[in-house]
Image: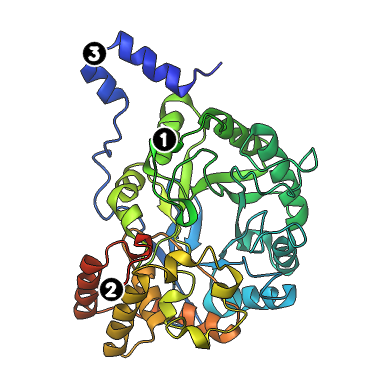
Amino acid sequence: MKLSYAISVLTAATTTSSFSLVRALSTTAPKSVLPDARNVITKNVQVPGLDNGMDFVKMGSSDLVVSKVCMGTMTFGEQNTLEEGVEQLNKAWDEYGINFLDTAEMYPVPTKAETQGRTDKAVNMFLKGRKREDVILATKVCGRSDRIDWLPRAEPETTAALTRDQILYSVDESLKRLGTNYIDLLQLHWPDRYTGGLFGQPDFSPGQLTAESAAFEEQLGALQEVIEAGKVRYIGVSNETPFGVCAMANLAKYEGYPKIASIQNSYSLVVRKDFEAGLAEACHHHDVALLPYSPLASGSLTGKYAVPADIPENARLKLFPGFMDRYLGSLNEAAVNSYCDIAKEANLTPAQMALSWCYHREHVCSTIIGATTIPQLDENIKAYDIKLDDDTLEKINNVYKKYTDPTKAYGVKA
């Protein structure tokens, strides 16, 4: 029987010297891990849609080799029809050489009982026209939420949580919807515990802690079961913190649990401090690949929200009014305007500059993009051909110094 992580640490503390304990829990990188030894391009494939071809990298500690651009799917079945979703995926594969897509059991968004699972139907339709080995398929199981009680579970109206039973049931249901017998990357969509800072919430406060959450051991134990059953190849996390990454990495190292290979967190020109200030170091040393989502900060970095009166009804701002407060009810507007000015000086669209910056950032393994139209999709992927010059990068860095964490400055105007 595996000892719990907490008990193992307590035992170590009472039976070893301080030096031994520190060494046992050390996250120091092996000497072989050089500064540029992560996210190295392993191959380049010439494709019709890109002048310089699509690059591929090994994803963290896994054996998966993924394209540097990953197709997000969360609009399929809501803002996009299923057929439009399939069209986007086919274009991404055939014209741009992408081999990686990301979905989730709760998609499309905004998540609701009436539409849950529709996105997976679009992915299923796409997979029927492809060799399974030509698609790196990632999906996610929901974290704890007292609001979400409509997911397929053994007992109806069960509120979402990362318990063993829910993880196992979720995987089986996802496989059915997707029409496949294995998932390449299964991710925990958000932590089961209180972390603070989740989806625009205030940062962590000890006074808000609750005892209700599934232990890391229970979550990783369930993930081990689906791996051993051949249903899942690799595992990852999403919306996770340095504590979560390090705790799971040490459980894998010292207790034999499966190792997380990736982390899918929000990362962009205006949402980067949380990752770069702590997670970047933890992920580098534990070989956990960053898969950024929302590289355009929910569309705000395109500059299309600059004039509120011109925002269309089907824009994400209108669909997610509360969710979008962090992008519009904060210093983010001033930061975005500054970045838009830099893009104009560089003869780029704001989207091109923001995406190029993210695509080629040293922290990044593969960037998850999303589009609601084919022209948007083309612009987003073609931005991979663009490499920002030193002058543009310096200007970006200067804006970052002024607006380091702008989406958290609620109610503040420049």
- Res. 165 visible in picture: yes
Q: Is residue 146 above or below residue 116?
A: above
For label 1, the SS is: helix
**What is the x, y in percent for residue 222?**
62, 33
Q: Check disc 3 and report its element: helix, strand or loop.
A: loop
State the mark number for residue 414. 2
The amino acid type, in three-letter code, at marker 3 is Ser
Instruction: Classify 10 Å Cα crowding around label 1: few (below 14), some (14-19), many (20 and above).
Output: few
Q: What kind of residue is marked 2?
A: Ala
**Quadrant showing the C terminus:** bottom left
Say which residue label 1 marks: 207
Q: Earlier in the sequence, mark 1 or mark 3?
A: 3
> What's the residue at 50%, 46% (across, down)?
237
The image quadrant of residue 406 is: bottom left
Q: How many marks?
A: 3
In the structure shown, which secondary structural element does the residue marked by tag 2 occupy?
Answer: loop
Which-is-in-front pick, marks 2 and 3? Answer: 2
| Percent x, y of residue 83 | 74, 76
Instruction: Tell me what residue is drawn at x 54 percent, y 63 percent.
Output: 322
Neighbour tally class for label 2: few under 14, some 14-19, many 20 plus, Cα within 10 Å: few
**Disc 3: which residue:** 17
- In the rendered structure, the answer to whether residue 390 lies left or right of residue 165 reads left
Q: CA distance from mark 2 to mark 3?
A: 52 Å
Q: In the rendered structure, which amino acid carries the disc numbered 1? A: Gly
Dot 2 or dot 3, earlier in sequence: 3
Instruction: In this rendered view, identify the residue nearer to me: 190 or 336.
Output: 336
